[in-house]
Image (tube, helix red, strand yellow):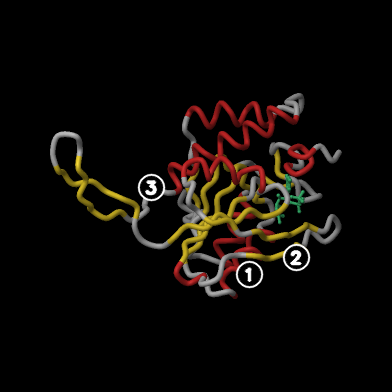
Amino acid sequence: MADLPNLTVIDHPLIRHKLHLLRDRETPKKLFRELVDEISMLMAYEVTRDLAVEEVDVDTPLERTRGHKIAGKKLVIVPVLRAGLGMVEGVLRLIPSARVGHVGLSRDEESLQPVEYYFKVPAQSEVRRFIIVDPMLATGGSAAAAIQGLKDRGAEEITLMCLVAAPEGVQALNQAHPAVPVFAATLDRQLNDRGYILPGLGDAGDRLFGTK
Ligand code: PRP
Ligand code: URA
């Protein structure tokens, strides 16, 4: 997308199918959780496509050959609480040895500004690669704050993975953190006057945890 150079939309048919079920207002909590989990796993496959590998020897039952193993910076998955928690298990299924940090941010309903209430990530951020997970990128305020928090702790390599992105949020991130790639399952149309994504899927946290 020419005007959103930081964005990659992963629009695999399986993801598109699961996304239409996720949007449906009649989808119950259990299925909603399963869909968030499955889409996250499928997206993780693409988000990690550029991971470095190194050649190693491997002894098959027949002979010695060369194979590849993941090399480079150790991965850390960072869910933005609460809704990002729904994406963690899906990513970990593909990258079971990844560490997990947590960033607690809540969007003020009036100002739409993020309020930080928790931040815990592994030490030595400069030697790690961070993947922030949050289903919704709306104004971009929460993602920008999470990225800034990681940078303040020394992180140099950060990727954002979300399910539904609004153009406003992608643009805001491109301004604030142009070197951070954004992966989304869909780019939606716009925000409404309360900062909700249209057509979107509603409040991801409430739908995951049944709080409304
Ligand atoms: C939602 C969502 C993002 C944020 C996106 O979280 O999960 O973190 O809003 O909005 P923004 O791009 O305008 O900042 P919310 O603050 O509702 O908290 P929750 O996950 O606890 O429900
Ligand atoms: N947060 C959500 O959960 N949904 C939106 O549409 C916007 C922000």
Q: Quadrant of residue 207?
A: top right
Residue that numbered label 2 is attached to: 116
Direction from residue 204 to residue 63 in the image, left or right: left
Which residue in the rendered view is the most extreme toward the front? Answer: 61
First of labels 3, 1 by sequence position: 3
Residue that numbered label 3 is attached to: 49
- Residues at marks 2 and 1 touching, judged by CB atoms closer than 8 Å: yes
Query: Element under label 2?
Result: strand
Classify the position of the C terminus by image quarter: top right
Q: Quadrant of residue 59?
A: top left
Q: Amino acid at mark 3?
A: Arg
Query: Element under label 1?
Result: helix
First of labels 2, 3 by sequence position: 3
Dot 2: within a 10 Å radius of its alpha carbon, few (fewer than 14), some, or many (20 or more) residues? Answer: some
Dot 1: within a 10 Å radius of its alpha carbon, few (fewer than 14), some, or many (20 or more) residues? Answer: some
Question: 45 or 128: nearer the eye?
Answer: 128
- Residue at 70 percent of width and 40 percent of height: 198
Q: Position of residue 155 (x, y in %)?
A: 52, 70
Residue that numbered label 1 is attached to: 149
